[in-house]
Image (tube, rainbow, N blue to C red):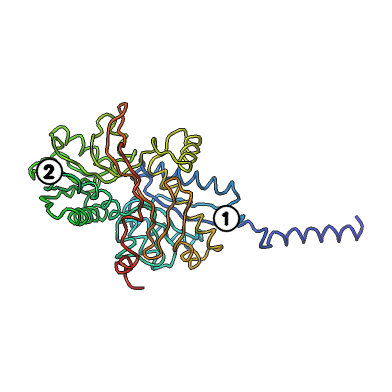
Amino acid sequence: MTTGRMLATLAGALAWFAGLSAPGLAQEPITLGEMNSYTTLPAFTGPYRKGWELALEEINAAGGIDGRPVTVVSRDDNGKPADAIRIAEEFVASDDVAIVWGGFFSNVGLALTDFAKQRQVPYLATEPLADAIVWSQGNRYTFRLRPSTAMQAAMLAEEAAKMDATRWATIAPNYAYGTDAVTAFKAELKKRKPEVEFVGEQWPPQGKLDAGPTVRALEAMKPDAIFNVTFGADLAKFVREGDIRGLFDGREVVSLLSGEPEYLEPLGAEAPEGWIVTGYPWYDIDTPEHDAFRKAYEAKYGEHPYAGSLVGYNSMLAIAAALSKAGATDAESLVAAFEGLEVPDAPSGPFTFREADHQSTMGAWVGRTAVRDGQGVMVDWRYADGADYLPSPEEARKLRPAE
């Protein structure tokens, strides 16, 4: 090889290596740290993972974020706050993540909310519903996707106020999600119907409902109606024991989340009929955005989407929108991007992350339960826009600690 050809070859190689580090050609991935209670509550978190994986695949197929692929480091928090904090520390120290996101149980979400504040790392709470996450313990670095307990309780109270019932009993798991839900429902219902009274409460530990004594205690209160916040296996035990003992005969039941297929489908033909619920009637939603999501999900996984699927998908859409808007991956740029962020093409409809409290306006479907072809479904439903069930920005700021 001549000296001239050798120099030309070397020059070409140097140009190629220089091109790899050029800003326009850099393909360094953006890493996200995700965790959830995968082994503790697989009925929800399994579809949730499928939802965000579908969105991630679509985002990267479309070129990623400004040409950078997105990768996710995912862990199981076992439903334990201590495990969640340990994992979040590993995300920051070892994985150099741009955002921490996920969580199911409210106690986990609250622990990660504090972590985000202390470490100044953006955290997107996808499923935890405790009001404190964005209000009393809210902070600059924490945002929440799903409508909170207060929002969904207000949606249900709006329907409950139309009933003749005045004597109410409640049953809810004894942790932040349950206590917040009962407190909010009481306040919202009394606001709309001052004459109602609450004649008793039951507070079973989450996942450990002793259905017989609980149902007997509720029956002894002689309520006109019941507000229920149990879910998962506890809901199934409550429904079956209540049916056996006639607890629901002649009584209205208002039930948070019970229209979600994760919790309704396992009941089969035993699903309650006529309960007012929040949920996800995937089988009857007819919008272009939801149709596209449903078809893609069914094609990839061979099953219909669940509420968890929708939450996972919307989470990834929101994160991608924030990254694109920020044009950077540092914490301050991402926080600024999330404040006021609009996500226009979500399968559930457009939503925005409010600047005032970092709560998104993603809504929920409200309707009644029924049995169709041996399967529990939602009927007579409507989509309740989350923006309609939030305090004003001025009121929301007063609910948050000074920063």
Q: Position of residue 324 (x, y in %)?
A: 54, 58
Q: Where is residue 402 in the image (x, y as percent from the top left)?
A: 33, 73
Q: Name the image quarter holding residue 110.
A: bottom left
Q: Name the image quarter holding residue 238.
A: top left
View extreme (right): residue: 2
**Image side of residue 209 versus residue 48, left or right:** left
User: Can the viewer see residue 125?
Assistant: no
Residue at 50% over, 43% down: 54
In this rendering, the answer to whether 343 lies above or below 336 is above
Residue at 28% over, 30% down: 371
**Label 2 secondary element:** loop
Tag 1: amino acid:
Ile
Q: Where is residue 49 in the image (x, y as percent from the top left)?
A: 44, 45
Q: Earlier in the sequence, mark 2 or mark 1?
A: 1
Q: Residues within 10 Å of mark 2 (few under 14, many from 20)?
A: some
| Viewer-side residue, 382 vs 7 | 382
Q: Mark 1 points at which residue?
A: 65
Q: Name the residue under label 2.
A: 224
User: Can the viewer see residue 296?
Assistant: yes
View extreme (top): residue: 373
Tag 2: amino acid:
Asp
Residue at 40% over, 49% down: 76
| Viewer-side residue, 57 vs 368 | 368
In this rendering, the answer to whether 265 lies above or below 396 is above
In this rendering, the answer to whether 189 lies above or below 392 is above
Separation of disc 2 and disc 1 at Cα? 54 Å
Instruction: Locate the C terminus and report the quarter of the image it occupies.
Output: bottom left
From the image, state whether disc 2 or disc 1 is nearer to you: 2
Instruction: Locate the N terminus and report the quarter of the image it occupies.
Output: bottom right
Which label sits on residue 90?
none
**Label 1 secondary element:** loop
Q: Where is residue 56 in the image (x, y as percent from the top left)?
A: 52, 48
